[in-house]
Amino acid sequence: MVTLAEVAQHAGVSASTVSYVLSGKRSISGATRQRVEQSIRELGYHPNAGARALASSKSNIIALMIPLRTDMYVPVMMEIAIAVATTARTHGYDVLLLTGEEGPDAVRRVTGSGLADAMILMDVQLDDERLPLLRGTDQPSVLIGLPADTTGLTCVDLDFKATGALCVEHLAMLGHRDIAVIGEAPAVYERHTGFAERTLDGLRLRSQELGMRLLHRPCEGGYDAMAVTLARVLDERPGTTGFVVQNESAVEPLLALLRQQGRAVPEDVSVVAVCPDQVAVQASVRLTSVSIPAQEMGRHAVEQLVAKLDGRGSDEVVLIAPELTIRASTGPAPSTTHH
Amino acid sequence: MVTLAEVAQHAGVSASTVSYVLSGKRSISGATRQRVEQSIRELGYHPNAGARALASSKSNIIALMIPLRTDMYVPVMMEIAIAVATTARTHGYDVLLLTGEEGPDAVRRVTGSGLADAMILMDVQLDDERLPLLRGTDQPSVLIGLPADTTGLTCVDLDFKATGALCVEHLAMLGHRDIAVIGEAPAVYERHTGFAERTLDGLRLRSQELGMRLLHRPCEGGYDAMAVTLARVLDERPGTTGFVVQNESAVEPLLALLRQQGRAVPEDVSVVAVCPDQVAVQASVRLTSVSIPAQEMGRHAVEQLVAKLDGRGSDEVVLIAPELTIRASTGPAPSTTHH
DNA sequence: AATCGGAGTCGAAGCGCTTCGACAACCTAT
DNA sequence: ATAGGTTGTCGAAGCGCTTCGACTCCGATT
């Protein structure tokens, strides 16, 4: 293991000079710098992370808490995690992966031990028990997701309320009047995960404004659950011509079931999904969808965090504007003219 | 920030005593231990990670390198990552998330800086460029996946060769003779990712032994790609009655296409999938499948690694035996009696 | 010519912890 | 009673780095 001192000796300078070459915190003459850099290369020197952390009280690590549950939006979570990791690296940070398992204790542990300089929390509940801890520490943090009370917190999320509105508007424009919303699993609503309820708010509000009828049904993923849900929906509202689906694992089952019942998409029924683009294009009917910008969310979160760590940046809520991509699953409502 | 020294003072003992209470490396009287523990609790002390790492040259961190690509098996990767993180915690380790982006440099960086005590690599290519580095360092590591040459390495993986064999045997037992294999995307084979080729080996070998005809076709995920692939397969081998699918995102499209062509599953055609159980049960036909034991792989990997770190354990290849779960997508071959 | 200030470098003092050797106090076997 | 071994505790020496103050040049300012 090569140390700073060895590099210094090899280059014929003092240890502090090497340190300043590395950090750039004091000016160094070109000649010295080159000699030091040369020695670093020749010896294959890597600064020791622990020593650095101890001396500077900065670990250059960002903690990322991901949910333990893998019951929803797994690809999205993964994409965010990867975006966080790669973006963090471009700013010189590494990422520590924490699962929800430890709960709030993880926050205490990481904050207390100086393991990480900052945290990113995913899967935030409306009334998350980790929030008081975050407010009580001076360690910067960013939430991906929106809790009920955002005072003193920095949050990044898709604007799900606008997302809901956007879906409704699109269907309204096509002449649909009776809309069914296939939501996340009931557990997600019981857990009071913000995004599901905010989407619903957006859907309800805008559909009311536009004079549309909306029926919301939570739905576990999978074929069987979707079959039951669909049957109930069509029983209660036979005139339903538009669907908004916010559950990745209900999308394909819904399409299969509609096909099976002789309802053509988009001729008889229109389907709008809220899902990653990849899911939308891989479906058996290319789906009109509002994409979940996982990468962008991860990137934004890191950039907010780095800004805070650099003393710039402040507490603010960044809501990413939703974008609707029209594909092959939506079209004019049938018999619009009969009204 | 509370320090060891403050705890020591509060408890009326020396710093080293507190350290020994924490580590248990020397015996401490019950009275002293309790007094120290009391002080720790009262002051809310958390050992500083950097100082610890510096003094002990152990960071208690395991690095996990996940692939940057999110083109395949995302849920599996995620599940493994989560299993790794939670298992690591039970052994007192945290997990550092590295993406493939940095490539071999990440190995150098982490090894050189002492950031992590050990590494777990996922998505190992047959001839992975990170392997020489691993062999050249004394830092313990475990691969999830199997490279071509495993000397000096510890690997954990599903026994994909046995998996292939198992799929074929099941179909053979049901009387199928013409089998088509819907494989991973062509890129996966070009990349020489071990598991895809090993599965194929198992399939080929066993089908030959059992006198079956096998047709293998790589396939991008998604509906359109699957449609093209299926058409080709049925054109070339109209008598195909059994499918083995090793591509999550081809499963549902295949089922939909077969249904659409009036081929009933499992009456006319049997389908065996190699995929996580969750995918198998959520499909429109509950799939007979060999499950990918993501959790178990993650857990195993960590346990191997911890064994190495503790001086126990050695280089060995752990292949997890595949398990076939029979569900609703396989049945006797049609017109078996006509032969 | 005397003074000032910036650029470039060094030495030394920690950062908070682990760990080794030393040592006192006690217990056991002779 | 004495040598020998345990057990429990302490002091001190680092671990490899950052950072602060101090110092030396040297060109620029009056």
Image (cartoon, coloured by chain):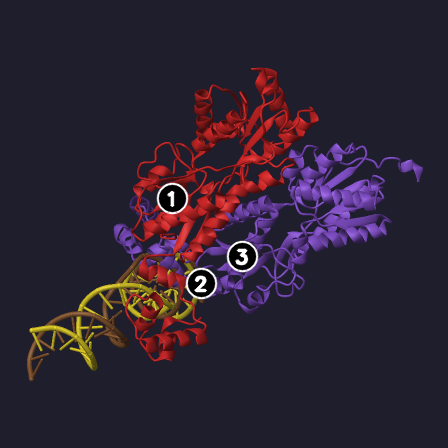
Chain colours: A red, B purple, C brown, D yellow
- Label of residue A142 in the image: 1
Left or right: B290 in relation to A230: right
A85 or C26, which lies in front? A85
**Camera-side residue: A134 or A225?**
A225
Alpha-carbon neighbours of circle 1 within 10 Å: few (<14), some, or many (≥20)? Answer: many
Instruction: Please state, as top left, top right, bottom left or bottom right, where the C terminus of chain B lies in the image.
Output: top right
Residue at position x 77%, y 42% from top?
A: B231
- The residue that appears at 70% across and 33% down in the rendered structure is B286
Q: Which mark is drawn over residue B100?
A: 3
Q: Which residue is drawn at 83% across and 45% down?
A: B237
Q: Badge 3 sits on which subunit?
A: B
Q: Which chain carries label 1?
A: A
Q: Where is residue A267 in the image (x, y as percent from the top left)?
A: 63, 27
Q: Mark 2 points at which residue?
A: B114
The image position of residue B153, as x and y in percent, is 61, 62
Within 10 Å of disc 2 (Cα), the crowding (few <14, some 14-19, many 20+) is many
Tell me the mark number nearer the camera, choosing from 2 and 3.
Answer: 3
SS type, badge 2: loop
Same-chain check, marks 3 and 1: no
For the residues bearing labels 3 and 1, Cβ distance under 8 angstroms: no
Q: Is residue A323 above or below residue B112?
A: above
| Residue type, numbered disc 2 | Gly
Residue extending furthest toward the front:
A337
Amino acid tagged 3? Gly
Circle 2/circle 3 CB separation < 8 Å? no
Left or right side of A335 for A195: left
* C-alpha gap between disc 2 and disc 3: 19 Å
Q: The disc labelled 1 sits on which kind of residue? A: Val
